[in-house]
Structure formats: C-alpha cells, structure tokens
Image (tube, rainbow, N blue to C red):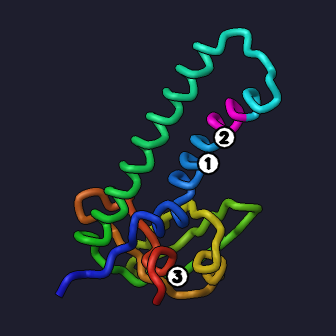
Amino acid sequence: MEKPSPTFWRVLDTDYLSTFSATSIGTVWGILVLFKIFRWTFRDETFYLLFAAGVSVLALVVILWRFLRIRHLFEVGQEVRARVVSASFYRDRGRVVVEYGQKKEKARAVCHLHTNRRTRKIQPGDWVTLLVDPEHPRSTVVREAYLDV
C-alpha cells in the first residue's frame, strides 16, 4: 500500500518557503504589468526584465526543491509522535515547535508553515506525527499540516 503524500498544490499552500517563492514571482511580474498599464518608465527596462526572470527561475527552483524534499520525507521519513511546544501565527507566517524522543534524549524541531485552515488547527499541547528523515534527522515535517487527517 502506497503511503499518502501531499500534492504539489498542498505543498505550495502549506510550506512557507514555497508560498513566499510563488508570491515573489507574482510580485516581480505584477510590478512590470503595473508599469506597463500606467505607462511609467523604467530607467533600464532590460535590467528589470532580467531581474524578474532571475527571481522567477530562482523561485521555481526553490519551489521544486521544497516539493521534492517534502515528498521524499513522506516516502522515507520515520513517523514519530511529537508534542507541540509552541505554535505561533502572524499574518501568513506560522512557526510550530515540536518536541520528540525519549525522556533522556528529547529533541526539538521547528517547522515554518504558511497559515491556512490545517496549520491553524495545530495548537500547543497537541500530539502530532512528525516525519523525520533517517539520514538527516534535523529534516522534519509535521504530517498533519500537509494531509487532511
């Protein structure tokens, strides 16, 4: 049986770095469109076009990297029960700190999430499933943030 994993759009909506990257693409091209609509002039339009293209390529690489990384964690990550120590949300940004492990060896992980209906449900004191990469134990994601459980 195949393990459930998030779709591309779910990762884009939940992972903060992916959301920020997608917003960056819209922002740089949106500014260009506004300049064209209002017939404002650039000092150097070629430079801005190259800048917008560069930002777009970099943002697309980041989005693809985060999507593949999160999908990888859903495929090979070890499921660990973790307690939410803190969950703070400000505007569109969320920061969830979880603690997991044995009594003597507790570890903490921080997940930066985009605020949405799934991530807002995560509250301090909740128990969540953390997916931990066996090769890179510092790489983690909160399963409930990406899937409807």
Where is residue 140 drawn, in percent x and y? 40, 65
Magenta stretch, main secondary structure, is helix
Q: Position of residue 73 (x, y in %)?
A: 31, 66
Q: Is residue 127 left or right of residue 81?
A: right
Task: Say whether marks 2 and 1 touch (CB < 8 Å).
Answer: yes
Q: Is residue 32 magenta?
A: yes
Mark 1 or mark 3, which is nearer the start of the sequence? 1
Q: CA distance from mark 3 to mark 2?
A: 37 Å
Q: Position of residue 120 (x, y in %)?
A: 66, 78
Magenta span: 27-33
Q: Which element carries disc 1, helix, strand or loop?
A: helix
Residue type of the residue flagged with mark 1: Thr
**Earlier along the polypeptide chain: callout 3 or callout 2?**
2
Amino acid residing under circle 2:
Thr
Left or right, residue 3 beside residue 103: left
| Residue under label 1 | 23
Q: Distance between the Cα atoms at labels 3 and 1?
A: 31 Å
Q: Which residue is mark 2?
A: 27
- Report which quarter residue 132 is drawn in: bottom left
* Residue drawn at point x = 37 percent, y = 50 percent: 64
* Residue with the mark numbered 3: 83
Residue at 36 percent across and 49 percent down: it is: 65
